[in-house]
Image (cartoon, rainbow, N blue to C red):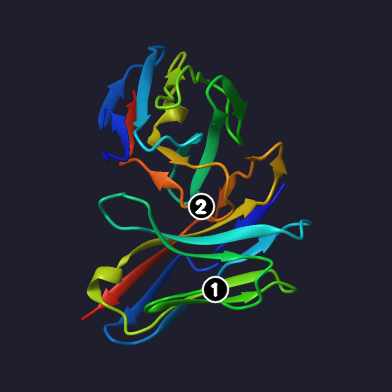
Amino acid sequence: NAGVTQTPKFQVLKTGQSMTLQCAQDMNHEYMSWYRQDPGMGLRLIHYSVGAGITDQGEVPNGYNVSRSTTEDFPLRLLSAAPSQTSVYFCASRINRGGTDTQYFGPGTRLTVL
Amino acid sequence: AQTVTQSQPEMSVQEAETVTLSCTYDTSESDYYLFWYKQPPSRQMILVIRQEAYKQQNATENRFSVNFQKAAKSFSLKISDSQLGDAAMYFCAYRSAVWAGGTSYGKLTFGQGTILTVHP
């Protein structure tokens, strides 16, 4: 199993550009989520999905869109990049039937918006 | 909404010694799960230990153990016999035990993190 994969690893955007961060998992996990990590603030939830076709907002959803057309993929779209979206982005997945089931994280994408 | 607070931005320990990282949380729920994650310089998030709130017994994983005080809403991590490889950022996290129709809707809420330095 490759686990949770994210592409790209690094990205530099100009203000106003749009892009999609890709996330895929091969563990047949129902639950997937996106976090951003900023210095001194831990990880904050952007969007999450409990299964294909179902998504919901997290703590900081503004400026981001998600969709979940398959169990494996959960892309994160930045509609119009802003410097405030400079951050490290993590995708994560877990099965959805247990309580303490381990959440697996991808390696992260470092995004810089100029 | 639940909040998780790690009041120690940085901690240091000598190799082979013991260190305790603090975590408190705020919730009105009675059933939930608590986790400690480790993030080394590689940025990979690694699960260290987890605790179910309904269990009174503190979780233990080799050199890592927790002190779970439910009434005080405290969840500290103790690292025994510290090793150089333990140096990392450590995050405390909370997840609600919210279920509906067989689906778990619990979302992870993280603390701000504690940077642990291990001195040889």
Image x and y of residue B109, in percent: 58, 49
- Say the numbered circle drawn on residue A101: 2
Left or right of A20, for residue B7: right
Residue at 66% x, 62% y is B25
In the foreground, A74 or A27: A27
Q: Which residue is mark 1?
A: B76
Residue at 31% x, 71% y is B117
- Say the numbered circle drawn on residue B95: none
What amino acid does circle 1 point to? Answer: Ser
Q: Is residue A104 above or below residue A32?
A: below
Residue at 66% x, 65% y is B53
Q: Is residue A73 above or below residue B37?
A: above
What amino acid does circle 2 point to? Answer: Asp
Q: Residues within 10 Å of mark 1 (few under 14, many from 20)?
A: some
Answer with the quarter of the image where residue A10 lies.
top left
Residue at 48% x, 46% y is A43
Image x and y of residue B47, in percent: 41, 58
Q: Quadrant of the N terminus of chain A?
A: top left
Image x and y of residue B12, in percent: 36, 76
Image x and y of residue B7, in percent: 55, 67
Left or right of B52, for residue A35: left
Residue located farthest toward the left when viewing the structure as drawn: B120
* Residue mark closest to the camera, 1 vs 2: 2
Gap in angstroms between the C-alphas marked 1 and 2: 20 Å
Q: Are marks 1 and 2 in contact (CB under 8 Å)?
A: no
Answer with the quarter of the image where residue A46 lies.
top right
